[in-house]
Image (spheres, grey):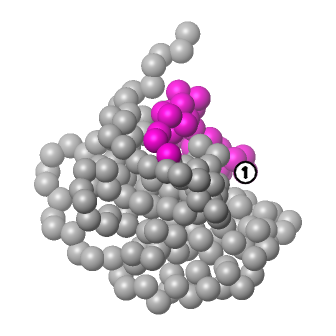
Amino acid sequence: MRYRSVHEQAAHDLDLAVTLVVDAPQAHLSLARLVDHDHIEPEGALVFAALLHLAGYRDQAQFWFEFAAGAGNRTAAFCLYLLHLQRAEHRTAAYWRAHARASAPPPQRPAASHRPQRFLLPEGVRRDLIRRCWRGRRPTLPPRLEAVIHSLPVDTPDEDFGEIPRPDRTLTQLPAQEPATG
């Protein structure tokens, strides 16, 4: 889908990028590593930023994108490029685009085990997010999942980003299925 302005196109592309991040098979594991480990987990920070973006926490998502990009995550840097391009902040967008290109390639992970992969979000939610993007609509999480994001603990308000939610174990325990609607 093509949009009339660069800014609208960047907004759509950012929505699509974060949707693909949370749709990735490794998203659940990456987020679990961020929550359960003391060391920096840039991939988990990227997934958390994507969830915040989808829940409407745009400034707070920017904080976590910057955290992940600063730790070398190229996808997070690309998301920041799109975010700043959407806001017509061209110098900052150019900085993050260059950062995405200059960042080291992702580290090689050990071969995945053959156990079944657990997705972060239920299949119906993931499909709906992608469908919304392809139809040119803004992807949003269902209210039940947004409520989980809204209930996360927050740090003392940051001067630039406001109250910044912290990831916790509730995010790694999201239901595998959406409840039946009737």
Q: In this view, does 34 lie to the left or right of 53?
A: left
Nearer to the camera, 61 or 102:
61
Q: Name the residue under label 1.
A: 136
Q: Quadrant of the C terminus?
A: top right
Q: In this view, does 9 lie above or below 21?
A: below
Q: In this view, does 104 lie above or below 131?
A: below
Residue 90 lies in what quarter of the image?
Answer: bottom right
Q: In this view, does 28 lie above or below 49?
A: above
Nearer to the camera, 86 or 126:
86
Residue 139 lies in what quarter of the image?
Answer: top right
Place of residue 121 in the rendered image (x, y in percent of width and height, measured from the top left): 42, 39
Query: Residue 135 in magenta?
Result: yes
Nearer to the camera, 57 or 122:
57
Residue 101 visible: yes
Place of residue 38 in the rendered image (x, y in percent of width and height, measured from the top left): 25, 59
Identify the residue shown where x is 65% and y is 70%. 82
From which residue to which does the magenta span run?
A: 125-154
Counting the numbered discs, the total is: 1
Identify the residue shown where x is 71% and y is 61%. 11
Residue 19 visible: no
Residue placed farthest to the front in the image? Answer: 156
Q: In this view, does 117 lie to the left or right of 123?
A: left
Identify the residue shown where x is 28% and y is 42%. 118
Nearer to the camera, 152 or 30:
152
Identify the residue shown where x is 59% and y is 71%. 80
| Majority secondary structure of magenta residues | helix
SS for dot 1: loop
Query: Residue 145 in magenta?
Result: yes
Residue type, mark 1 in image = Gly
Residue 81 lies in what quarter of the image?
Answer: bottom right
